[in-house]
């Protein structure tokens, strides 16, 4: 079949190009621009090449933040994925209670992030917060503004509270798609509960779990609002995760050059880790099959 | 292996069934003899799968009891009943190898590894998948999947019964024959009680010693293929078995005479005067198309199916089917039919009446 060639058709793509350029490409390029220049004010910029990148790569501050970030994401994933699956497995499969569960579980997902932060910030306060006050009354030392461990526990529990539902809902959708015949056959074959999970439910959930892991990884790796509201990155730098550090650098200190270099590397790290995740998991799935 | 007794069994999928129509399976008493091969035949939605799932314990009946030999298993779990069942939809554990799939029921029962290895090899040979035993059971054709499901069903030797729920629906016709033959030889070899659900009469008639015909949640007849053919106990059996099915004509019956639209027909037996919905049933095989003798028909068309010809005709405004032998020449003058007296069945309200010797 002959294709009709009409170069005027390119004009039809123009609006989209203009829109995407305005909303994405130009702002992104500005960041790239900042990352390779320095300024002493007066809107005078000097080319510095990759200096900012080199500086950031040798910055202990960034490596510390990256370390904290990796630990945070790892903990979040190890708690939320199994917990989400566990919740999904124990949810009623149909009827009124199932719907009720679904609605209740999606509630945390609907709360704006800074509100989630505020809720936990107050909840954990020793003077007026229910949690903080109760723990204090029980004689347990808990003060997230001074104690590193308490601060970490607070932001992790908060994230688990906020996001486990997402994993559970995805896992539930995966479970619901398994035809009844599989469970019936497993019963006939006298499979144990564990065997049913291992050989039927888990394989059938793999697809949605992969999405859940990717989403939770990316989100937790970029987390900003909630820990910022609760701990502000403290005590000291104990909960200063990558994005909190980045904002401090860019807007607090107005170090636009290093912050831009930081942003670009941050972006590349997320891209690479997500790609590795995805490749490994699709390969795993192929190998399973 | 066990004799399975159904005692006053009935099932409704509703929580509080009120009328008889609420029951998917109407009250039923039946004994499945130990070691027999049964086919459960009926159209879709007649309750045959429900009955099968009740026997295997996947569904718990609303009323009645199930006995295996003399033990009441009504509330026993599927595992305790130790039953094998193969479903219409093939189920394969696709993260396992074919070998592990076949070994799965044995492993779950804690059989010894040597026994499992030996048994799986045998079953692998039986379903013709020896070469694929070590492959992952993924990306297989529907045929292969169902063969694995069948293999998993047959792998345990000590099961109380083997249940098949339309297992060959997804399989290619030539493979169907082969697998069915294998199931039959398996039955001869081990003598398991087998129940085979199907809506395909050929499958039912070739597989089973006895065919159980279900209609609208009720068992309407249990018999050998020959009995079902010659003496259908219910008009549904007559219509469902045979190709084409039995002709059912409304009539009035008095003594040894039936009146079909005013035309008199001699019967072989004496029935007295019958009330209710009276019909006579006659299979197309037992009607002959003649010239000048018998009752008038209008031939609509003739279908030559190779072994015989099916004549579709109009008989007092009703459709009637006649089987003519392949050799018979059908001329335009043949516009009358005669019935084989001995093969005319009389039905009152859909159920066959026996009558007395005339």
Image (cartoon, coloured by chain):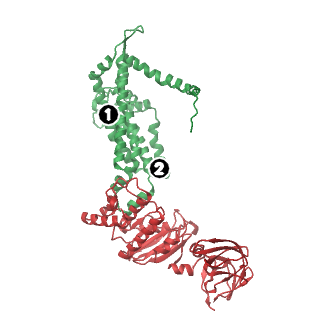
Tell me the residue at 57%/79% (across/down): B233
Residue A97 x/y as whole percent: 47, 50
Is residue B53 visible in the rendered structure shown here? no
Please count the marks in the image.
2
Identify the mark at residue B163; answer none if there is no mark: none
Residue that extends furthest to the right in the rendered view of this protein: B262
Question: Which of label 1 and label 2 is nearer to you?
Answer: 1
Residue nearest the observer in this picture, B319 or B7:
B319
Q: Give the colour chain B carries in the figure.
A: red
Residue that extends furthest to the top in the rendered view of this protein: A42
**Quadrant in which residue A160 is drawn:** top left
Identify the mark at residue A98; answer none if there is no mark: 2
Q: Mark 1 points at which residue?
A: A72
Q: Chain under label 1? A: A
- In this rendering, the answer to whether A164 lies above or below B348 is above
Quarter placement of the N terminus of chain A:
top right
Q: Is mark 1 on a helix, strand or loop?
A: helix
Residue nearest the observer in this picture, B31 or A20:
A20
């Amino acid at each position: 079949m002959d294709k009709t060639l009409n170069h005027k058709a390119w004009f039809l793509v123009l609006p989209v190009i203009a829109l995407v350029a305005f909303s994405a490409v130009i702002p992104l390029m500005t960041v790239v621009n900042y990352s390779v220049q320095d300024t002493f004010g007066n809107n005078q910029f000097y080319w510095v090449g990759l200096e900012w990148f080199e500086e950031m790569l040798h910055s202990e501050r960034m490596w510390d933040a990256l370390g904290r970030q990796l630990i945070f994401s790892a903990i979040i994933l190890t708690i939320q994925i199994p917990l989400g699956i566990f919740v999904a497995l124990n949810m009623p499969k149909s009827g009124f209670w199932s719907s009720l569960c679904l609605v209740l579980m999606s509630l945390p997902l609907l709360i704006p992030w800074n509100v989630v932060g505020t809720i936990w910030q107050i909840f954990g306060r020793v003077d007026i917060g229910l949690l903080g006050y109760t723990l204090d009354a029980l004689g347990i030392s808990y003060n997230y503004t001074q104690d590193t461990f308490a601060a970490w526990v607070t932001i992790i529990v908060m994230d688990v509270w906020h996001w486990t539902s997402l994993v559970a809902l995805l896992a539930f959708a995966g479970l619901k798609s398994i035809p009844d015949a599989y469970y019936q056959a497993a019963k006939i074959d006298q499979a144990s509960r564990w065997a049913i999970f291992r050989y039927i439910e888990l394989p059938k959930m793999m697809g949605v779990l992969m999405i859940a892991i990717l989403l939770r990884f990316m989100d937790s790796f970029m987390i900003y609002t909630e820990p910022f509201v609760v701990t502000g990155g403290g005590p000291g730098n104990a909960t200063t995760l990558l994005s909190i550090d980045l904002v401090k650098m860019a807007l607090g200190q107005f170090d636009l050059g290093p912050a831009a270099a930081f942003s670009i590397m941050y972006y590349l790290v997320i891209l690479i880790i997500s790609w590795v995740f995805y490749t490994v998991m699709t390969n795993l799935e192929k190998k399973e099959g | 292996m066990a004799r399975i007794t159904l005692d006053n069994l009935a099932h409704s999928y509703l929580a509080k069934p009120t009328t008889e129509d609420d029951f998917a399976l109407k009250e039923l008493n039946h004994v499945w003899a130990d070691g027999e091969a049964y086919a459960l035949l009926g159209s879709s939605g007649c309750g045959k799968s429900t009955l099968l799932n009740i026997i295997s314990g996947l569904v718990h009946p609303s009323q009645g009891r199930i006995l295996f030999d003399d033990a009441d298993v009504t509330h026993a779990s599927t595992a305790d009943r130790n039953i094998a069942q193969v479903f219409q939809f093939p189920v394969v554990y696709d993260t396992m190898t074919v070998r592990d799939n076949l070994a799965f029921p044995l492993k779950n029962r804690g059989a010894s590894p040597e026994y499992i290895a030996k048994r799986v090899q045998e079953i692998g040979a039986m379903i013709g998948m020896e070469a694929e035993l070590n492959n992952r059971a993924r990306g297989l054709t529907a045929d292969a999947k169902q063969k694995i499901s069948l293999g998993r069903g047959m792998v345990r030797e000590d099961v109380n019964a083997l249940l098949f729920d339309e297992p060959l629906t997804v399989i290619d016709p030539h493979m169907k024959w082969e697998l069915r033959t294998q199931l039959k030889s398996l039955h001869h070899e081990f003598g398991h009680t087998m129940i085979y659900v199907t809506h395909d009469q050929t499958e039912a008639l070739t597989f089973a010693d006895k065919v159980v015909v279900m209609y609208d949640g009720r068992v309407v007849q249990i018999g050998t293929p020959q009995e079902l053919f010659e003496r259908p106990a219910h008009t549904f059996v007559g219509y469902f078995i045979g190709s084409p099915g039995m002709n059912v004509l409304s009539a009035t019956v008095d003594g040894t005479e039936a009146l079909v639209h005013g035309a008199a027909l001699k019967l072989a037996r004496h029935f007295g005067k019958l009330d209710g919905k009276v019909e006579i049933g006659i299979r197309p095989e037992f009607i002959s198309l003649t010239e000048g003798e018998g009752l008038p028909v209008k031939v609509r068309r003739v279908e030559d199916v190779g072994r015989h010809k099916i004549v579709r005709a109009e008989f007092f405004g009703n459709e009637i089917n006649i089987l003519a032998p392949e050799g018979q020449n059908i001329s335009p003058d043949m516009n009358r039919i005669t019935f084989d007296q001995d093969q005319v069945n009389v039905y009152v309200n859909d159920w066959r009446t026996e009558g007395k010797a005339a």
